[in-house]
Image: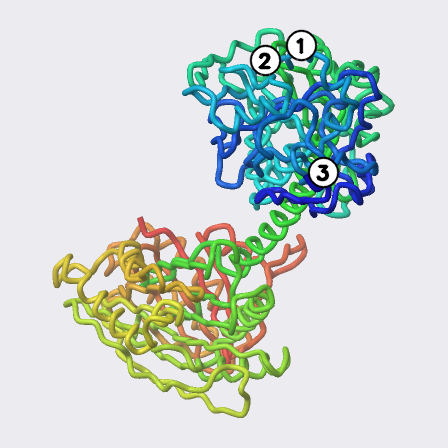
Amino acid sequence: MDSTRVTEHPTSHERRQPSAARPTAPADPHHGALLRTPEPPVQGSPGLPAQGRPAQAPAPSGSGGMSGPDEAQGPAGPSEPAGACAAATGTPAASGPPAGSQGPPAPSGGHGPTGAPAGSGPEHSQPSSAESDPHRPRPAPEGVPAQPGGETAALQNAKERRTGQGPVPGGPMPMRRDGDRLRFVGAATRRIARGIDLDEIVMGLCRATVPTFSDAILVYLRDPLPVGDERPTGPVVLRLRRTDRIPEDRDTEGFLLPALQPEPDVGITAELCTVRPGGALNEVLRGVRPVFADAPAARAALPELIGDDLTVPGGQRAILAPLRGRRRVIGAALFLRRPDRPAFEADDLLVAAQLATHSALGIDKAVLYGREAYIADELQRTMLPETLPRPTGVRLASRYLPAAETARVGGDWYDAIPLPGSRVALVVGDVMGHSMTSAAIMGQLRTTAQTLAGLDLPPQEVLHHLDEQAQRLGTDRMATCLYAVYDPVAHRITIANAGHPPPVLLHLGGRAEVLRVPPGAPIGVGGVDFEAVELDAPAGATLLLYTDGLVESRLRDVWTGIEQLRERIAATAQLTGPDHPPPLEALCDEVLDMLGPGDRDDDIALLAARFDGIAPSDVALWHLDPEDAAPGRARRLARKALSRWGLEELTDSVELLVSEVVTNAVRYASRPVTLRLLRTDVLRCEVGDDVPQLPRLRQARATDEGGRGLYLVNKLARRWGATRLSTGKVVWFELNSS
């Protein structure tokens, strides 16, 4: 057989080269070598024969193979002693078949780790005298049970190639070659890399190593985990994050795994461990390299990690591997094998190092990703209102859905802003895109809209100033917005639109209509006049404001979606009858249920407003001349209104507070002062004048003759406030009516 012939293996990650020209793989893992290549046996010393693998034998499901689609195809189990591994060296391999071999050439499933034919391994490079000596059968560790049904043809070939000694029937098939280790590490790292968050990565490490590489594993991580470049303060604390082990009662094709009595119970091991500076555990973690448990440093470090009451199996059946991220050690992994299993080998330290390195880097990235997702989620949360207000005469409900769970930020927003005169501003907008930049622009526009609403500007003026603000933020800052002001006393609503989809109004009888409002140009275009329309808002009607993500997708255009939305709202209203509008929360859920599997292409903001209004019989309005007699007249008018409403118990408090507020108003006003009382679930009193300066609460000194009016209002009223108008201001207070 030609010694330079190469046999390819479909799952090997090595670059196949002629065995005579292949350089020896370096042993240092930091120089890129995954496994150390041992020296061939000295002439005259009987080398253990490498065990053959049955061709195309499926991996057993109990102890030898890993579960999952990407697992290694080679046999699993403990590794062969380092001196017996078949590996390529710089010495050319023998060109002919080994002495005593009478079978056909080895199939591709039985090649060594270098991809050379099975007859060219180091054990076949020994002199014929060494080959003819009887070999002691290799002890088969209990790891992977053999396939039932007798010996296959490939096993017969393996016996002929390996001096007649094949695997013991019913025994395990250990991971004896460097190629097996390579395939196992490749499959394990792929499984670890599939995880995107911390728990998935740690679980991937545990599932990839148990039972293929170890019988049990304990994974410790720092608590808290450092993020990025931040420097943790305080002592280093390791917390047991996850454990995994072979079940004691697991039956693998008739082979019962015995209980792990001599090894520590991973269920009762210490959960927290404080790493003492200068201690043995600290030195092992700083060393970064995995160590056997019987090493002097590990013997002193393990009690500090798992506690003094627990022990680990001896004889190199435990490996302590530090987990080092990009900048610092973030934890440790402890691999354990049972005493009845063969011990770890020197090459297994390199396998543990690869597993620890890939896991630590994955954990580092998962922590960074988690922090970024947390920041994005908090940014979006702060940009949107935490709770909706409860203005007089209107009930509100809202929903927000991001474009995807992995990108919880976007440019959609909604808002409800109480205005003077018991009015409320309803706002919904959509900044182009759903990125962090869109969310930041959305936050600035929402803040601007709140400020403009506080000035009580008309809706078209609010959109005009938002357009100017968007142009100041940048030339490509585009957004759509709909701004509406509802007056519960007049039962009217004023709407201005800037390129946004029109709202839908659901009447009390169940009829749903799309309101005809001027479309307008999007915010940020510049030089466009916005127009407002005033429409009826009857009591019991429901106004639905939304963004285009609800009605537009790749499967339908926006107008088709709007018509489907109108039909869905009308159908929902029919379920509750013509005299009872559907509950707002249930209505919002029904609207979102109209979205199909492929309809989530954009963020969705939804704001529903139920117009209850204020009946004319519950409103009392007067105009008072700015004169000294105005406070007395205000007291008399308020007393009569309370008597008509049956609220005589509030007479004393209302007279005192009305007198104080009206006195402050007529002192500086030059035009008539308005006094309005509103009876809803609370009694609200509003006093308006033409002076824009807002009153401020202050502590009056003992010698001051005034300055105590607002102090009394603050003490006796349920709530109070002052709002600046374009024509002056309004000072209001509320009292509980029951």
- Amino acid on which the number 1 mark rests in the picture: Leu
C-alpha span from label 1 to label 3: 27 Å
Residue 265 marker: 2
Residue 357 marker: 3
Residue 326 on image: x %, y %: 76, 44
Q: Which of marks 1 and 3 is in front?
A: 3
Mark 1 residue element: loop
Mark 3 residue element: helix
**In the picture, which quadrant includes the N terminus?**
top right
Picture quadrant of residue 345: top right
- Amino acid on which the number 2 mark rests in the picture: Asp
Residue in the picture at 30% in, 56% down: 589
Q: Do the residues labelled 3 and 2 touch (CB within 8 Å)?
A: no
Query: Could you tell whether 477 is left or right of 20 in the image?
Result: left
C-alpha span from label 3 to label 2: 26 Å
Residue in the picture at 46% in, 72% down: 429
Q: Which of 433 and 176 is in front in this view?
A: 176
Query: Could you tell whether 207 is left or right of 635 in the image?
Result: right
Q: Mark 1 points at which residue?
A: 310
